[in-house]
Structures are given as C-alpha cells and as structure tokens.
Amino acid sequence: MTKAAHARYWVRLLLIVLVPALVLPPIGRAQDAPAAPISRVRTGLDVILQDMPEALRGKRIGLITNPTGITPDLRSGADLLAARRDIHLVALFGPEHGIRGSGGAGAAVANATDPKTGLPVYSLYGGNRKPSAAMLRGLDVLVFDIQDVGARFYTYVSTMALAMQAAAENNLLFVVLDRPDPLGGDLVEGPVLDPRWSSFIGMYPIPIVHGMTVGELAQYINAESHVNARLMVVKMEGWNRSMWFDQTGLPWVMTSPGIPHFGTAVLYPAMGPIGDTNLSVGVLTTKPFEFVGQTFVQPWRLRAALEARHPAGVAFREVYWSGEPWTDSGGPQYAGVEIRVTDRAAYRPVRLTLDIIDAFRQLYPNQFRWGGKWGDQYVFDIDMGTDEVRRAFIAGRSPAQIEDSWQPALARFMQTREKYLLYPTGH
C-alpha cells in the first residue's frame, strides 16, 4: 500500500467511526430523560449548612432523618450536623426503615445508639409512631429532613405530622428542611382522603398525588388540622413547581428499599394500591412498581387491553419475571407488562391505576381479587383513602365515571392548598 493509499485508508476509517458519533444522538432511555435542562437546587439542609439560622444556633436539637437526608456530594446530614459547633445535635429519630435505612418494609424498628455518631436513636416506627415526652426531654428544636416521594400513602409525611403534634404539645420549635416533590408541584390527582379512612398510610384529607413539598404539607397540616406547632420551613433555593426530581441536579438516594430509583417513584403513585390487590407489581425485581401482572396473565392480551384504553403519557412492553429472582428455583413465574412514562405532561398516575384495574377485571374476572385486609378494611381502600373506588368498580362504573366522582373534593383541596404553596410555577 502506498503512503497516499495508506493515508486515504485511515481517513475513511476515521470517518466511519467518528461521523456517526457526531451526528447521531446518544443512546439512552428517552422516556427517563429530564423534560428540561438540569438546574442545581439547594435543599433546606444545604441552606442551613451554609448559613445556620439564628433560631437554631446554640440550641439542643433532635433530628428526624434517614439516608435521604444528604447533601449533593452524598454526605449524611446527621453526620454533618453532629460535627457542628454552632448547634448541639443530641438525638436522632428514625422513621420506617430506620435512621440508616436498614429496616424492611413494615418491620418494627427498635431504639438504638447510632454507631457512627454515638447519638441515641429513637424509633418512630416501633412502639412509638409519635415522639413521647421522654424522648423530647431536654430538646429545644425538632428538625425534619427526609425526602418524600409525593404519594399520600408513603408513611414519611405521617411521621412528620405526628412529630409536629408532639413538638406542639411539648412547646418545641419544629423545623422542616424542605426537599422537592419528585413529581414536581403541578401534578395533583386522585380521591381526597375521607377522614373515616385515616391511618398511618394516609392521615389527612389530601389527594393521592398532592403536588406539595414536605414543607408545604407541614404548613397545610399545621393550619388546616389545627396542630398549631411553632413551625419553621427552611425553603429550598432554585426549585420551581415544573421541576421533576431529575431536573434538580440533586442525587437520588433510595427513599426506602422498595423505591430504589427515581423511575420507581414516578410510577409508585399509580402502582402502590395495585400492589395491595392480588396482582404483582414486580417488587422483588430490579424494577419494582414498574411491572404489573400475575401468573395467569397472557401479556399480549393485557397490553392490548391497556392500549385500547389509551392511558395518557405511558407505553407498555410485554414482560416476564420471577417472583424470587435470586433463588435457584426462581419462585413463581409472572407475566404482564412493563410501564414506561413517555409524556410527563400527559401522565396521570391515579387514572392509570383505574385503567389497569379495569383491564384486569374485564380480562380475568375470575382471578382478580381486591387483596388483603387490615381488620375488616381492604388495604386497597386504605391506600385510596376511601372505599368508594372499589365499590364503584363493583357497581359497574367506568374509570372515567370514577374519576369524575372525586373532582368536587379535589377542586376544594386545590383552592385550599394555594394558601400554603411556597414556590413559583415554572417558566
């Protein structure tokens, strides 16, 4: 080969390799890409670490937190606050799953001593769901710093509310270090909880998807439920209501063992109640709450039935999975669909819940069951905050009719919540 031919060969090779890389978009999961450029949001924790509020300086503080209470460089807020000299962190309080995230779903958490900081850890998911007077003795301030997922039936907001009640009863300042609602602040949907269905997985008359940060919820609960705590919310900087979590520049940390990824949190408001029927939602897979099916399902039939309902903003893929993927036997073999959110502006998680249940009831009327009970109440009803949804299905009402039924209460909630919103709409 001549020098000229050799040069032409290498030029052609470089063009073959480099030109596609220059003109083609990067390969990735388009449905998981953020809807707008990423911004760096500063959480309430970030704000106080840079400039400690005077209300906290020199005070004896109890901190309610878990592994989500971190800085952008993945350092624990509990560790950082314990090392400060301008405050005195003297106790830690852990919600469901514990202060370091070691507890399983629904498993009682014991009081302990934190091995890293040496501080006493009081469990708020064991013998006490609400801090006792003895736990709070000697404190001046109770601080809450936990990332919520934006669904009413996630228990961390109940932990916050009960702790706020205890702070009011013991004359402590209650401080919320605010963090984003992962689904933004504009999406609001679902039935408003009927107070007769109040429980630890839904205590207050708010919809399933409320579109509020924990700081905004604290203000709403404090005023509307007459808690009357001395409440202080340390606002985020740089967040607006159009931002979903992956647009904030903040790192996602699993909020609990069942919510490992941001994509899980996106579908959790839709799939949480379905997981309390007899359907599988893939909890024992690497994509919990992103699958739905059962051992008796023909996935092509389920996909067709769901697509015929035209649920907004989502797409379906036929899928099979094992109930116990880490064992040799594999456990039960499930079949169904994977759900992917393709249009965030159109996505309506609670309507998706209705469409999925309707499809199963039509396709598999002899196999679908409403699932387990706590006492004489279906867990599905407790999730929904009412038994009217289940009863409406049994009476033959359509998803559209069921959705229409909760609109008056939802409109009243939307009007009331306006008083407690802390952040602007997006641009």
Image: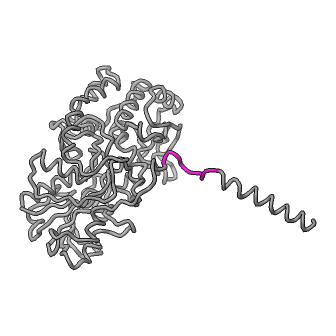
Residue with the most extreme top position: 396
Does residue 153 appear left or right of residue 331 in this picture? left
- Asked whether residue 327 is in view, the answer is yes
The picture quadrant where one finds residue 347 is: top left
Does residue 315 appear left or right of residue 12 in this picture? left
Front-most of residues 238 and 358: 238
User: Is the image coloured rainbow, by chain, by secondary structure, or in one colour?
Assistant: one colour
Q: Position of residue 350 (x, y in %)?
A: 34, 36
Q: Position of residue 288 (x, y in %)?
A: 42, 47
Whether residue 54 is situated above or below residue 361 in the rendered picture: below
The picture quadrant where one finds residue 205 is: top left
What residue do we see at 33% from left, 41% from top?
Answer: 187
What residue do we see at 19% from left, 70% from top?
Answer: 91
Front-most of residues 342 and 351: 342
Q: Is residue 28 magenta?
A: yes
Q: Position of residue 298 (x, y in %)?
A: 51, 31
Magenta span: 24-32
- Secondary structure mostly seen in magenta is loop
Q: Position of residue 384 (x, y in %)?
A: 27, 37
Residue with the most extreme right position: 2
